[in-house]
Amino acid sequence: MRNLIFLVTGLFALTSCNRTKIEGKVVDPFGKPIKDISVTIEGTSFTDKTSSSGNYSIGYVPGGNIKVKFTKDGYADTNFVVNIATKSTFPAQQVAMYMIPDKEALYLISQDNYIPIKKGFFNKERRSSYYQTNDTYVTEITEDNFTVIKADPKIVFLDHVPKNISLVKLKFLNDNVYAIMERLSTFGDHSDGADVIKEDYFNYASKFHLTIRTPSSSLEPGYYAFIQRSNGEPAIEDSIYIFKVEEEKSDISSSQKNSSTSVGNSSINPSESIANSSVNSNDTQSPDELYEQALLYEKQQKYSEAISTLDKIYSGYPASKQASKAVFLEGFIYANVLNQLDKAKEKYELYLAKYSSVDAKMTEDVKRELRNMDKSSNEILKGIQEQQIGIADTTKQSK
């Protein structure tokens, strides 16, 4: 027999009547009545069992807090407390019951059953450049490692996983590879790149680990995952549960379908289609979203697209926290990737004129870039060595 649990929801109303009873109903998550649940008033001999229609009616002694408990073998205990001062019939809103699955897993509570969310795997990649280091946790999306969920403002999950897990939105990188999260270190600015989705919880105190999880806001179409996190980073490779939120498909003409998937006789790569759709929506993107898109282009070595996106940050949001980073990154790409030193100098000087007081470390890097712009590699290396020797001498003298 499958284990079951139930969740008390709603508020309770008080009406005056000659009987002294608490009355209510118990149903499963799909609205079907549950029978033979034991209902008791804690500290008294009042008891009842739910009928085949899920109803119960139990006596009580008025005055003070009254704790109503629901128990049965194979169920997780639950209760509610109510304060009733006078003799009356107290109609409680119905209690919804949730099955505990036979196996530890994460489930979507659908309209008529529980759908297990498929497990996936991830790995860690470290990417370094002059201006930042990325520890990127990535997962590969395949046809058989994610569950499809239709977009719904009331998506509810049942967490039967004995680990502390978080819901995150996956970020597209390329082809079928998605970032679970990135830990970025840029000029001393450390940030956790996980896009964690806020949730509402209902935890059960029983020998079973069980939590009802509801995203606090509607999930937009895209890929998501539940992951275990330890010290802010994903942990245990098999503890990732991947799902895709899909919009209900609407009827579109064949010409619209063709225009969205091909240009002339040339097919568009799905990864390019996603990237291009992001670029086309830049007019409504925030500075943070634009900066993420620019970093993605830079990783894909699409430098003209990266620069164009960074320009939109400075021109559209010059007072944002990402504007200074955008101007610096443009200068860095011009100087160290494209070798267009005139444009690099223009961007660096713009940074010093507008943002020199924003980030002391970044400002020092800009000045260093300008000093080294006309030097050869050997001259730059010699300068670094001399600086290191000076630091070492100062350290010795201080001792």
Image: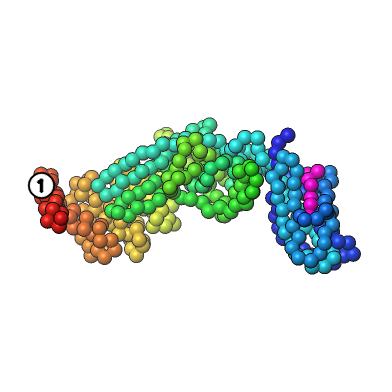
Instruction: Classify residue 389 as left or right of residue 124.
Output: left
Tell which of 74 and 385 is nearer to you: 74
Tell which of 340 and 180 is nearer to you: 180
Instruction: Classify residue 87 as left or right of residue 64.
Output: right
Residue 335 seen anywhere in this rendered image of the structure: yes
Q: Residues within 10 Å of mark 1 (few under 14, many from 20)?
A: few
Which residue is rendered at x = 56% and y = 54% of the image?
217
The residue that label 1 is drawn on is 382
| Residue 241 included in the magenta stretch of the image | no
Rendered position, 351 above or below 103: below
Residue 376 seen anywhere in this rendered image of the structure: no
Secondary structure found at label 1: helix
Quadrant location of the N terminus? top right
**Where's residue 378, x and y in %?**
10, 44
**Where's residue 149, x and y in %?**
59, 42
Outermost residue toward the top in this view: 144
Label the magenta part by its dominant secondary structure.
loop
Tell which of 115 and 96 is nearer to you: 96
**Extent of the magenta region:** 31-41
**Where's residue 31, x and y in %?**
75, 47
Give the tally of numbered discs: 1
Which residue is rendered at x = 19% and y = 46% of the image?
339
